[in-house]
Image (cartoon, grey):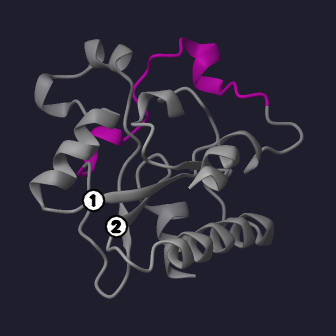
Amino acid sequence: MSQWHHARRRWGQRRGFSGRSSARRKGGKHIPERWKDYLPVGQRMPGTRFIAVKVPLKTSFEKNLAPEECFSPFDLFNKLQEHNEKLGLIIDLTYTRRYYKPEDLPETIPYLKICTIGHQVPDDDTSFKFQCAVNGFLKENKDNDRLIGVHCTHCLNSTGYLICK
């Protein structure tokens, strides 16, 4: 498991990524476009260990949301517990760090950041990092049924592409 905590610092860091999104320059606490249109957590994909989720938002975003719209890292774990599922790894495919911090997650859940540019097909390097992370997780977690939670901003494009690839 310590391998994954080290991954918090190394994986997905590309040259040219400043950690600042264009939204931050516009004000920073804006809800991602169309984020409210999607369910927070999908269903476990049959025959896999994957579950797609939309990006959880740190509590500072809550002032821009109705209470029933809020979806924080804490809410993610509560929703999975309601379905008797446990998370074993979170793979964050967003190309920003503004939505939440890895420190907002329980220490017991490994987190992996793979910066993925939105609105385009993930490149081979991104696909390779994703596949290595998944294969490593599955190898280390043969004895349990924990899930790999994957998210981009809305849990659609990059998430779906990489899970299906």
Q: Position of residue 140 (x, y in %)?
A: 53, 72
Q: Which amino acid does label 1 sit on?
A: Lys
Residue at numbered disc 2: 146
Residue at image location 12% in from the left, 61% down from the top: 83
- Disc number for residue 86: 1
Task: Work out whether 42 lies above or below 116.
Answer: below
Q: Quadrant of residue 30?
A: top left
> Front-most of 47 and 5?
5
> Front-most of 97 and 3?
3
Q: In which quarter of the image is the N terminus?
A: bottom right
Which residues, given as a range, are shown in magenta? 18-39
Q: What residue type is labelled 2?
A: Arg
Question: Is 3 on the left-hand or right-hand side of 152?
Answer: right
Residue at image location 34% in from the left, 73% down from the top: 144
Q: In which quarter of the image is residue 130?
A: bottom right
Q: In which quarter of the image is residue 87?
A: bottom left
Residue at image location 16% in from the left, 52% down from the top: 81
Task: Work out whether 76 lies above or below 103.
Answer: below
Membership of 34 in magenta stretch: yes
Q: Position of residue 124 (x, y in %)?
A: 78, 72
Question: Is 86 on the left-hand or right-hand side of 111?
Answer: left
Membership of 17 in magenta stretch: no
Can residue 101 be seen at all in this image of the molecule? no
Residue at image location 28% in from the left, 34% down from the top: 74
Q: Quadrant of the C terminus?
A: bottom right
> Front-most of 146 and 69?
146
Q: What element carries label 2?
A: loop
Mark pair 2, 1: CA separation? 5 Å
Q: Where is residue 133 in the image (x, y as percent from the top left)?
A: 63, 66
